[in-house]
Amino acid sequence: MEKIKFGMIGGGIGAFIGDAHRRASRICNDYELAGGVFDVDYEKSKEFAKKEGIDLNRVYKSVDDLIKAELALPEKERMKAVSIVTPNALHYPFAKKLLEKGFNLICEKPMTLTVKEAQDLEKLVEKNKLTFALTHTYTGYPMVRQMRDLIAKGILGTIQRIDAQYYQGWINSIIYDTGSRITGVWRLEPEHAGVSSCMGDIGVHAFNLIEYTTGLEVKEVLADLNNVKDNVKLDLDGSVLLRFNKKLKGIVRSSQVAAGEENNLSIAVYGSKASLKWQQEEPNFLYLLSDSEPTKIYKPANGYNEKFAEESHTMPAGHPEGIYEALANIYKGAAKSIRKQKFKAGEFPTVHDGVRGMKFIHAAVNSNAKGNVWEKL
Amino acid sequence: MEKIKFGMIGGGIGAFIGDAHRRASRICNDYELAGGVFDVDYEKSKEFAKKEGIDLNRVYKSVDDLIKAELALPEKERMKAVSIVTPNALHYPFAKKLLEKGFNLICEKPMTLTVKEAQDLEKLVEKNKLTFALTHTYTGYPMVRQMRDLIAKGILGTIQRIDAQYYQGWINSIIYDTGSRITGVWRLEPEHAGVSSCMGDIGVHAFNLIEYTTGLEVKEVLADLNNVKDNVKLDLDGSVLLRFNKKLKGIVRSSQVAAGEENNLSIAVYGSKASLKWQQEEPNFLYLLSDSEPTKIYKPANGYNEKFAEESHTMPAGHPEGIYEALANIYKGAAKSIRKQKFKAGEFPTVHDGVRGMKFIHAAVNSNAKGNVWEKL
Amino acid sequence: MEKIKFGMIGGGIGAFIGDAHRRASRICNDYELAGGVFDVDYEKSKEFAKKEGIDLNRVYKSVDDLIKAELALPEKERMKAVSIVTPNALHYPFAKKLLEKGFNLICEKPMTLTVKEAQDLEKLVEKNKLTFALTHTYTGYPMVRQMRDLIAKGILGTIQRIDAQYYQGWINSIIYDTGSRITGVWRLEPEHAGVSSCMGDIGVHAFNLIEYTTGLEVKEVLADLNNVKDNVKLDLDGSVLLRFNKKLKGIVRSSQVAAGEENNLSIAVYGSKASLKWQQEEPNFLYLLSDSEPTKIYKPANGYNEKFAEESHTMPAGHPEGIYEALANIYKGAAKSIRKQKFKAGEFPTVHDGVRGMKFIHAAVNSNAKGNVWEKL
Amino acid sequence: MEKIKFGMIGGGIGAFIGDAHRRASRICNDYELAGGVFDVDYEKSKEFAKKEGIDLNRVYKSVDDLIKAELALPEKERMKAVSIVTPNALHYPFAKKLLEKGFNLICEKPMTLTVKEAQDLEKLVEKNKLTFALTHTYTGYPMVRQMRDLIAKGILGTIQRIDAQYYQGWINSIIYDTGSRITGVWRLEPEHAGVSSCMGDIGVHAFNLIEYTTGLEVKEVLADLNNVKDNVKLDLDGSVLLRFNKKLKGIVRSSQVAAGEENNLSIAVYGSKASLKWQQEEPNFLYLLSDSEPTKIYKPANGYNEKFAEESHTMPAGHPEGIYEALANIYKGAAKSIRKQKFKAGEFPTVHDGVRGMKFIHAAVNSNAKGNVWEKL
């Protein structure tokens, strides 16, 4: 099958997330990286392209240049999609331009800086009937998809509590350094990162995982955030109480200063009959707890799984796939959509998930700023 | 060495917690159960005593009778301590009478129904110079004590986040039953249990574990509690935000309706340099995480442990001790105090811990009732 | 109920295994330690008794003295059982004398030094209709008993492979020391330990666990043992191939020089339909693997367990019991037998298990000595 | 950098291992699949190529055709390497032809059917100075490489025991079926699989992992293999005792009938000072046990790791990579060699590892056939 030609904005030399996107695109094998704007520095951008074996004619100085030049190409040659892997603040302006000109997008999260921007993009995507995949990568794991389908089947009974956590510790090494690195890390600077560090960068993944696996919507939040140190401008840590309805509450806990935690994202959904628990660092194990039966461990590539989980894993049982394969699953889902093939809800996070995420981040920040009051999403 | 003669209030036939106390007293081997008021029904109380081989002359109809009769015995024969293992509402009246008459106490938690009652007992204990051990059993585990000592040594750096959880699921089978059992379970009835079910019965353990391991005091809380069903009078689930100081926040999460969870108490204390994590269902493993070194697993009976942990475990390494041994460690600590031997702070939870616990429960319930506002302890 | 008066041979000051037996006897609450020969040094023996509050009149200079004096007491006062917790070489002579005089026995393993001795004891037990409990402690764990019952129900299909392991590392610190301690550790001396260190002390537990859980008999073994250092007289490590029948093979792997291993006893029984796995250091988790269903984790105190497992655990679910409770379960089983109450096969390991163990040890040692040939049990 | 053009023999529609190789080649991004002989059926081969977007002119009817046509191409266009992913019996004839004509090879294991064949290939590789990478995929995991380097540094002291296991259960579903599938599975047919099923297909991975991580050579083996059912022609299960030297013994245990086991490959290397343990199903955790310190857990992407491990993982800490990335690491190592770049021993398993593996398989089968005697490698 013809590969989808795509471009990339950001993700040049040294950028780990751009590399992850490229690997994912190669794993799923539906894409071909045709060019892009890999760096604000044009020379560096070309240097990168040379290293990667990318046609230098399609390395552009700016997103505007890219749009103009690509649109001038015959449709068959033209990039059909663009991946945006820049710092947060640039997602919106680039996404807007590209959507307006008819490019499908794959975009890093958080989607924008404001809810308004997010809603703008949502409208554009709908209007222009484009594919917009937001890379909440963790939704690409087979056992996360299994969790979603098991919950949809109703095996938990009435959901009674939802508890998601995302703990990392890497920012400690920065905030206890001699100051210089604080400005160097764009995630800690409001002008690049937006209103939040911890909730915007990782808490939102936990939030997304909740809505993705349960199909429920958080209605309001009450947040207590912590900047940890006086010279830090954004939250590095916090707890966010969630309300879904009168009898269903939950929580998102997140920290970037939990020393020694690497990427400890986990979710537990507790129902009246049974519960499901999953941890990102051991992604191929899904635990089903119940009051009346032994705990069950679901693993990929087994006949007992739902179809979606099975389609999301290619190796035989017991051969661990990892995060690149999860991201590849999202790229694959987006490819189906781009190609107008049939696909399932949940094969990739959408622009709507992006709007939800922005609402969550802003509601949390506002709740905290107002003195820990309930804030609607 | 002469055994400490002790009595027991409650804990007759079918009472699991009374049996646990008796086993603990036998494991540590410092006590001899001399008699008690094992049941409100005197006949059942005697039946129990017969079964256990306890002198029927020291099975009493009431706590008043016990006090009177025991005080009439020569001091050498007399009970020196009494264990109170009744439902919550009876802890205070019995404890008060016994303390007033000079009996040392070992008492189940939550200590009383109100903060005022708890403070009364605290004054009495101080005034009469008695031993009062509150059975926050989990503080008796060797690795919890190791955690306390490692934190006291400062190996975590600045503590930045504290997260404790206590999840159980057994109440689901009750609240989804046909109503009859709801009244049967005293933990769900305010007149027996007090103002809270979930926070009073288990959340308070998580709270206690935080103060026990860190030596820090929670200053204020903001709680969102959940009764889960309309006909349930008390909280069965909830999250409690904690503040220790301006830059240190934490959380207690607790549920009795987390289906399939058995007794999932866990604690994580995150510092600027390192973090410690412990789970009750695998009590002999303590995890030390750090940014710069591999995660370390501490286990009992190893030379690398602090002295207190080592004294709290008797088997060679790799031979698991369990919750009875944890409770026995608390009984042993209380025995040292009763015998006026030297003992360490932390060898048993005190009446002061009981006051703290009552403050926590009431602050959480009040915060929730007032609409999730900060409430001082 | 009247407690069973029992005596103890060995287990004085500093002896960990004697202390374990006493704790177990107190936990199950069926016994009263009436006296014994706690040390070869009579003064030390008395010192110990004083410390423990044991009647000094029943501290004896020798087993002969004990027998004579106890038989002189009225039957109601007399010890009905004796626990033997001496080094291996003394098990047989003491057991023989005591059985001949009608004492029920609880005896540490390995039961004797030779198969012949073991068979002698077996005959004596049968002839005098006495209770003989061999403390293969691990058979007292609830989840080991669950494993036994699940296998007996046939849920594994045809058993196709059995793999048991017992790894410890503590002897490294001895054999790499300056020699002096080698003689100090009786387990390394043939005159005290018998023909084997590793297989005799721990390998035999793994062997026992196989026969206990499966109900199968090992027919022949082929062993490759390793003394590890030239100046060590006994095996410290080895692998023993097992044959049950033409199509069923297995293995016991055991080491005392596996640095850092504490008490890593584990067993896996693989069948045509499903398999069961258990590890001693996490004794409250039993894993059932199958080709067609998610892995299941059995835990104690759940309605889904077989009755025997449930009777072997007293705490509610999620409250870990440990090795003292396992040993207490064996003491409780022996108590039922001593009292002529009804009990199940498997409630305590018998003198026949002791004969099997001695056959295993000797077959392994002989196989190794003869150049790794098959040796019948 | 210019991609290495490579071809593939086998691995057409439905072949999982061919797909794995292609993914790995794309992940490491050093290769371009130029053509091949994907199926014995030429039409199927072309169908596959069409689906993958491979130039149909380079889909060949036979290996001979491939060689002839590729050699006729200008060197810049020509395949520089070929991946052989056929059933075992075809590895040797194809490898021989390709090596003779100067193609570098990436070959599935077991390398050949006989030791002689393996040695032939080894000579050819040396003579023609070619790259030959044998895909013992597990050696590509970062933590396996960390294990190798930690052992090379000597942190274990004297190695005293080595224990490797490879358990799977998938063949149960075949051998208990109605016979038909037995012939369908080439792994159970001597003419396709060679002299062994279990040892040849998976036991040899465990063996390889031992020699890879320790740098030691197994000198002789004693095997007890099990065909499990009468109508099965090859071993499906077995234990192989290993000897490295007089004082160092070990074991390989392997089964394809361990119901419910998925891909449970594990290795433990025990030394006098410390030990290392690793399990394939949780590949990002490496355990270092020692007598004097808490157990340490090494994870990828941490500064405390050796350089080789760090170079073998691209994601930040806590983002799990899996088996495709392990295989990609081997492809990357081979690419360095093919390009005459500098590379480390251990970056890919070599033809010499293939010879060792064949010696192991044959020694095990011979030992078993001769009645479980020691057989030299």
Image: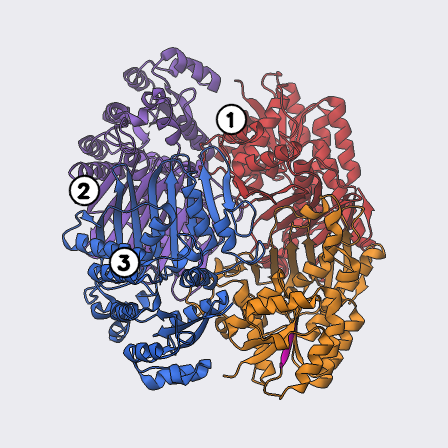
Chain colours: A orange, B red, C purple, D blue
Task: From the image, tell me which residue sits under label 2.
Answer: C372
Q: Can the viewer see residue C301? A: no
Is B137 placed above or below B236 here?
Answer: above
User: At x 15% / y 55%, what residue is drawn?
Assistant: D369
Task: From the image, tell me which residue sits under label 1.
Answer: B29
Q: Chain of mark 1?
A: B
Q: Residue D199 in the image: state x and y as whole percent.
A: 27, 58
Residue C310 included in the magenta stretch of the image:
no
Q: Nearer the viewer, mark 3 or mark 2?
A: 3
Asked if residue A115 lies left or right of residue C176, the reply is right
Q: Residues within 10 Å of mark 2 (few under 14, many from 20)?
A: many
User: Label 1, label 3: how many angstroms apart (C-alpha)?
Assistant: 55 Å
User: Label 1, label 2: how many angstroms apart (C-alpha)?
Assistant: 49 Å
Asked if disc 1 and disc 2 are in contact, CB closer than 8 Å, the reply is no
Residue most extreme to the top: C43
Task: From the image, tell me which residue sits under label 3.
Answer: D199
The residue stretch that appears in magenta: A79-83
Q: Nearer the viewer, mark 1 or mark 2?
A: 2
Q: Can the viewer see residue A106? A: yes
Is C135 placed above or below A104 here?
Answer: above
Query: Element at badge 3?
Result: helix
